[in-house]
Image (cartoon, helix red, strand yellow):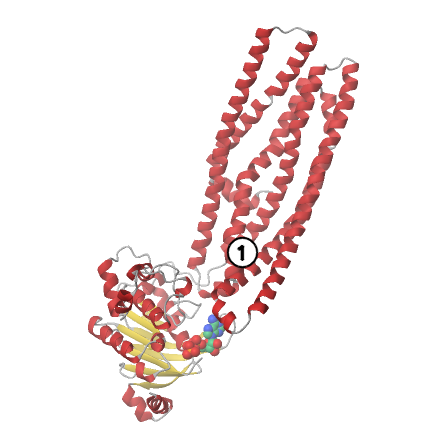
Amino acid sequence: MFKKFRWFIDYYKKEYIIALTFLFLSDLVGLIPPYITGKLTDLIFKGEIGFDRFIKIILFTFFVVVVKYFFAMGWSYFINRASNEIEHETRDKLIRKFLKQQLRFFEVNSTGSLMSKSTGDVYALSDLAGPGTLSFFDSTVFPICIVIMMAVAIDFKLTIVSILPLPLLAILCIKIGDKIYEKYFIAQKSFDNLNDQVLEDVEGVRIIRTFNQKEKRYEAFTEKGEKLRDDNMNVAKLEALMAPLQRIIPALTFIIAISYGSYLIKINEISVGELVSFTYYLNMLIWPMYALGNFINMKEQAEASMDRIGEVLNYKEDYVDREDAVDLKDEVFDINFNSHSFSYPSNDIKRLKDIKLKIDAGRSVGILGKTGSGKSSLIKQLLNLYKMDTSTILLDNMPYDYYTTKSIRSKIGYVPQKYMIFSKTIRENIIFGDKSKDEKDLEWALTMADFKKDVDEFTDGYETLCGEQGISLSGGQKARLQLARALIKKPGILILDDTMSALDSETEKNILTNLKENFSGLTLLIASHRIVQVKDLDYIIVLEDGKIVEEGDSDALMANKAWYYKQYQIQSMEE
Ligand SMILES: Nc1ncnc2c1ncn2[C@@H]1O[C@H](COP(=O)(O)OP(=O)(O)OP(=O)(O)O)[C@@H](O)[C@H]1O
């Protein structure tokens, strides 16, 4: 029954043992007051009790109640501790898993789904680990203790007859629980879809407005919202079905107990006080019936959530470093694409075909080509973002997988085509968690990226908040912020994927001059549509449909009189 949750029970064994011991002691002590009440009733009925004894019994009962609540404090603390730890640990595992993945993982798992798995599903697990464990104990061990007490201290026959309807409740709860699992799984999927749309709408709000898509998006949202509501209602209906069962069946046990108990008093088998204690114990059995329903509910939901979380945690990494991979030590290194081809995992179409390109350390290379020709795809190979043939890329004459991916990436400064700006300050976006960088490094990176003059004009300077996806910055400022983030690493290799398109020609020139003057030995790769951005580089390749169709320096390509030559003329005229 608990196979899926074994790991957290094993992990927090100590907390659970302490918590359940406290819980057990608290429940045991809780059995004393009903017994005393029955005895007291009999003593009063028979007139066998004086004031002193009465006070002593009352004080003792009070003492027992206090002890019970001290034990309750203990179990409450340790169970909540385990539950919070499990929530933290599971979320931690998920985030670590997300951060390890190549981009394919994010193509098959939507952001909305990953978000709801790391929130709602994690809560369902922690609910089971905390209140769920309490409900489990209280619906199994506790009622057994009560029933034993009823049978031993009061009357065996009365106990058996009164609790006869209870197994029926257990069976019905288990049956309904199975259905809850199915419905909850469906509801969580609907929550994923709704999450996805919220993310897209918030991120794309400007486009949605400009394209007058507000109504359509609203309709789509309403539809998803209604589906989620209906799916949640299906879960709620099943939960509601448990409630009357939890009331009617215990009520039945009361009717039986009072009727049969009265008969037993009449034939002198039990006393009035014993029937008082008995009904007291029966009353205590009501909570375990609720607890059973709660537990089954929580268990089914947590099981569905564990399966959903498991889908992520068991996702087989698309790429893992070889066990004997070593760290790449050189800051700058030769790169050799040796007949390298590549297809994205989503289909078999070759997006890079037989690429042969040697980039010596410290050289600058321009990657040109029309849109969709494979420029970004070529660049991404160096970052190992998708599964690829690692044997046809050599770094310092060794295959790519000879080195750890982390060490390769740490040498590369990458400015992607798509902006990725966090809703933090400019300082935080550039330093990006690197504690070794100080004020001087920040200032230097901003100057290199020709962004300092802009930031100096902002009222809050380095502390200016960039907003969601850099909403408070212009396109050119976003490009330079990303460039500053790449440069502060002082990389050996700098990759600019269409970074300069958003910049005016003067800013572009300033940046290239800064790079030339301050980064001696830098290997520079620039992917672009615009010839002006690459014409002064050491080497230029032109891609067409994933193949290199022209290569050489600008003079050689001009002499070639092919695509480069024609584009040069067209773009010069445009400028
Ligand atoms: N993640 C992906 N999955 C599948 N196909 C992709 C993916 N990314 C890009 N492609 C396809 O690969 C081809 C090359 O795309 P790439 O982004 O490398 O071109 P590009 O030359 O950089 O284009 P642009 O100049 O427009 O940025 C395109 O046909 C594109 O549709």
Q: Amino acid at mark 1?
A: Glu
In percent of width and height, residue 51 lies at: 59, 7
Taking 537 as reference, is 64 above or below it?
above
Residue ID at (26%, 83%)? 536
Q: Farthest residue toward the front?
A: 459
- The quadrant of the picture occupied by the C terminus is bottom left
In percent of width and height, residue 197 lies at: 54, 63
Disc 1 secondary structure class? helix
Residue 230 image-quadrant placement: bottom right
Judge: label 1 CB < 8 Å from ligand 1.
no
Q: Is residue 47 left or right of residue 127?
A: right
**Residue that mark 1 sits on:** 311
Count of residue discs:
1
Residue 132 image-quadrant placement: top right
Q: Is residue 521 left or right of residue 293?
A: left
In this view of the protein, can residue 417 be seen by the observer? yes
Residue ID at (33%, 72%)? 495
Residue ID at (64%, 36%)? 290
Camera-nearest residue between 160 and 419: 419
In percent of width and height, residue 25 lies at: 54, 25
Q: Is residue 426 left or right of residue 114?
A: left
Residue ID at (73%, 34%)? 249
Taking 120 as reference, is 422 above or below it?
below
In this view of the protein, can residue 344 be seen by the observer? no
- The quadrant of the picture occupied by the N terminus is top right
Camera-nearest residue between 562 and 407: 562
Camera-nearest residue between 539 and 515: 515
In percent of width and height, residue 333 lies at: 27, 70
Q: Is residue 387 left or right of residue 226?
A: left
